[in-house]
Image: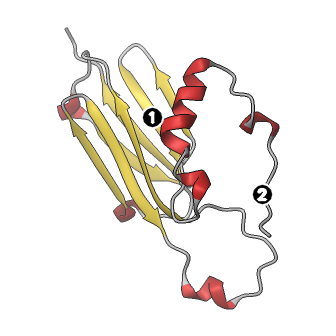
């Protein structure tokens, strides 16, 4: 028997958009244990779009970021180390395994000036808007 953490929001999406996102992004993650879906914040301001991924415990070398034809794909893997397997854990609530998130970007972005930084468990991607 496996124990599943209860979250009331798992059963009632707050919008149709959330329902579609859950269908495409979480269907694989909820069926196994080798993948997960990092939480993402998307921010738009006057000059750029920012996408923040909550992915603690990784190094910046663990990410694969591809931006092509206004499609952004961010993937990577968080591995459960042997050191942790030797410890006597009572619960592991953090996510391990591979992940991939994909986004269609608007036409008004300048992909050549995109920037990424990773600090304190947050991967921050900044994609400037085209000056036109």
Foreground pick, 124 / 70: 70
Q: Quadrant of residue 77?
A: bottom left
Determine whether the residue tagged by mark 1 lies in a helix, strand or loop.
strand
Residue 56: x and y in percent read 57, 58
Q: Mark 2 = which residue?
A: 4
Determine whether the residue tagged by mark 2 lies in a helix, strand or loop.
loop
Please report contact status of discs 2 and 1: CB closer than 8 Å, yes or no. Answer: no
Q: Which one is earlier in the sequence, the residue at label 2 or at label 1?
A: 2
Q: Is residue 50 left or right of residue 108?
A: right
At horizontal 78% and vertical 57% (from top left) the residue drawn is 4
Q: Is residue 10 left or right of residue 80?
A: right
Q: Quadrant of residue 111?
A: top left
Q: Quadrant of residue 15?
A: top right
Q: Mark 1 = which residue?
A: 51
Q: Is residue 37 above or below residue 56?
A: above
Residue 29: x and y in percent read 55, 53
At horizontal 79% and vertical 54% (from top left) the residue drawn is 5
Q: Is residue 7 left or right of residue 75?
A: right
| Residue found at the very far top of the displayed protein | 132
Q: Residues within 10 Å of mark 1 (few under 14, many from 20)?
A: some
| Residue found at the very far bottom of the displayed protein | 86
Q: Is residue 108 above or below residue 63?
A: above
At horizontal 55% and vertical 21% (from top left) the residue drawn is 17
Foreground pick, 31 / 34: 31
Foreground pick, 61 / 117: 61
Q: Which quarter of the rendered picture does the N terminus lie within?
A: bottom right
Q: Residues within 10 Å of mark 2 (few under 14, many from 20)?
A: few
């Amino acid at each position: 028997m496996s124990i599943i953490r209860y979250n009331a929001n798992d059963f009632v999406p707050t919008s149709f958009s959330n329902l579609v996102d859950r269908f495409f992004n979480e269907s694989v993650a909820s069926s196994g244990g080798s993948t997960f879906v990092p939480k993402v914040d998307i921010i738009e301001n006057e000059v750029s779009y920012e996408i923040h991924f909550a992915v603690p415990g990784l190094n910046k070398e663990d990410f694969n970021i591809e931006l092509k034809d206004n499609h952004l794909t961010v993937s990577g893997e968080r591995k459960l180390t042997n050191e942790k397997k030797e410890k006597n854990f009572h619960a592991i609530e953090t996510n391990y395994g591979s992940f991939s998130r994909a986004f269609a970007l608007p036409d008004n972005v300048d992909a050549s000036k995109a920037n990424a930084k990773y600090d304190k468990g947050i991967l921050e991607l900044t994609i400037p808007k085209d000056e036109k």
